[in-house]
Image (cartoon, rainbow, N blue to C red):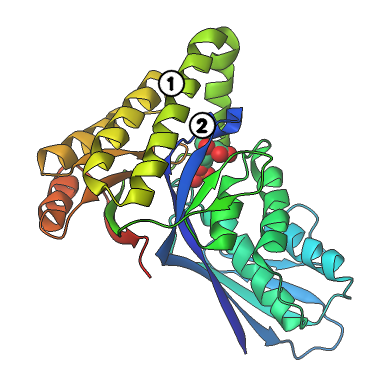
Amino acid sequence: MISTSAPGKIILFGEHAVVYNRPALAAPLSGLRATASIEEATTTGAGLTIRAVDLDTTIRLQESAEHGLALMARLVLDRLGAAEPTITVTVESAIPIAGGLGSGAAVSAALGKALSAHLGAPLDAPALSELVYEVERFYHGTPSGIDNTVISYEKPVYFVRGRPPEVFSLGMPVQLLVADTGIPSPTHEAVGGVRARWQHERDRYEALFDRIAGIVDTARTVLEAGAVGQLGPLMTANQHELEAMGVSSPAIGRLVTAARSAGSLGAKLSGGGVGGNVIALVTAESADQVRAGLLAAGAVAVYQTTIGEG
Ligand code: PMV
């Protein structure tokens, strides 16, 4: 049986501004993954069936026009010039849905990897990323392309829309806690809100995006140099710009403040914001205390992740 997986992701710096052609930094969440496994179906000619366990949905490719997972399967078959096989693909994900952690892109990527492996032609990262981007467009109109990229490459990336992604290495591992506000926040709504405000106040928003671009470029240098001590203030500065952009919320603010009071060196929302997740920079010594502070401030789940390992 073929079984493949793809990680979730966090945006370290630069969300939203990345939609407006500024750079952003993102990293895979290796411990939170979506998986796809394939079984040969017993009925001849039944075609491809996708069991989306978390959505409690079964999709038959021959019948389904309007589903992102069906679109992903069709894109893979078209890319490989392959006929529809008679198989069942089961897709599952440990990544919370609509939490800014790339769950949609991860399930599409896992499905694309499994199906292409089954057909004997596993897609490489650039090809997989391209197809997942098409599905992201189907879900939310104007994605920057950062989610599909980091999830397909499974490496930290410096990303500018329309340019090949730059994979980069960290000078030392960085430990983060990812805290879920428990408030689902569809990305397209947060992105649509920014667009509406940008249309009214173009100069102010362009200046905000420029300041974020400056933070992103500094953060890349700091990460590559392994100067983790300088990272916290940059995260806090990025959070302030996101607040000014109107994509923070009281729940996000509570978690950011709680993390900092409990000893985190910097914290910010990650992804679309409004709800979703907050990331907090920690050390081995501060992690337990910060986790406790986040839970006490209302986080419904806290995951620990280390980026830049190995
Ligand atoms: O909420 P997420 O994880 O899908 O992240 C969205 C990131 C944005 O910059 C807000 C949108 C985008 O397309 O880059």
Amino acid identity at mark 1: Met
Quadrant of image for the C terminus: bottom left
Q: Does mark 2 have its CB less than 8 Å from ligand 1? A: yes
Left or right position of 148 against 73:
left
Q: Residues within 10 Å of mark 2 (few under 14, many from 20)?
A: many
The residue at 76%/78% (across/down) is 121
Q: Residue 14 in the image: state x and y as whole percent.
A: 46, 35
Q: Using the rendered view, name the quadrant where residue 18 is placed.
A: top right
The residue at 58%/27% (across/down) is 192
Of mark 2 and mark 1, the one earlier in the sequence is 2
Q: Residue 291 in the image: state x and y as whole percent.
A: 17, 53
Quadrant of image for the N terminus: bottom right
Left or right position of 234 against 105:
left
Indicate the secondary structure of the residue bearing disc 1. Answer: loop
Amino acid identity at mark 2: His
The residue at 30%/52% (across/down) is 226
Look at the numbered discs 2 and 1 and tell me whether their residues touch, using CB distance below 8 Å: yes
Indicate the secondary structure of the residue bearing disc 2. Answer: loop
Report the disc number at residue 16: 2
Q: Residue 173 in the image: state x and y as whole percent.
A: 30, 60
Q: Is residue 218 above or below residue 209?
A: below
Q: Is residue 255 above or below residue 67?
A: above
Report the disc number at residue 79: none
Q: Mark 2 to mark 1: distance in Å?
A: 9 Å
Along the line of sight, the residue nearer the viewer: 38 or 47? 38
The residue at which mark 1 appears reads as 245
Q: Residue 161 in the image: state x and y as whole percent.
A: 64, 38
Task: Confirm whether residue 273 shows in the render.
Answer: no
Q: Does mark 1 have its CB less than 8 Å from ligand 1? A: no
